[in-house]
Image (cartoon, grey):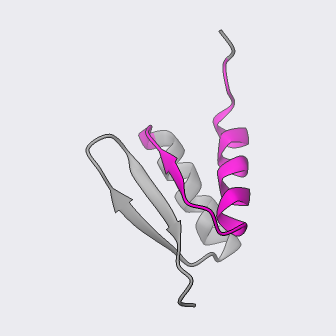
Amino acid sequence: MTVLDRRVMRDEKINQLKQGRSVYAESSELIRLIKRGINKSELNVELEYTNGGCWFTPNENI
């Protein structure tokens, strides 16, 4: 089994958001890292919490 670095996962998901694609995260640690990355990148993203995690959707109405 390969252990994935959460920061690498965060960077991949932030890049997907920059390309206008929605991303999903399950762990609270990854959600926290993505939120910090969104703030640093000044992206306009909507968050939708579910029972299992969180959807991050780029907001096209900038």
Task: Count the labels in the image.
Answer: 0
- What residue do we see at 64% from left, 60% from top? 37
Side of 48 where 60 appears, left or right:
right
Residue range corresponding to the magenta coloring: 3-28
Residue 1 in picture, x, y percent from top left = 65, 9
Residue 17 sits above or below residue 33 on the image: below
Asked if residue 20 is positioned above or below residue 10 in the image, the reply reads below
Identify the residue at image location x=69%, y=58%: 16
Question: Outermost residue, left direction?
Answer: 51
Q: Quadrant of residue 40?
A: bottom right
Q: Quadrant of residue 44?
A: bottom right
Farthest bottom residue in view: 62
Q: Residue 61 placed where, x, y %?
A: 53, 89
Could you tell me residue 34's position as x and y percent? Answer: 57, 54
Q: Is 20 part of what is drawn in magenta?
A: yes
Q: For residue 11: magenta?
A: yes
Where, by quadrant of the figure, is residue 23 drawn? Answer: bottom right
Q: 10 left or right of 48?
A: right
Residue at 60 percent of width and 70 percent of height: 39
Residue 60: x and y in percent read: 57, 83
Look at the image and tell me in which quarter the C terminus lies. Answer: bottom right
User: Residue sitting at 62 percent across and 62 percent down?
Assistant: 21
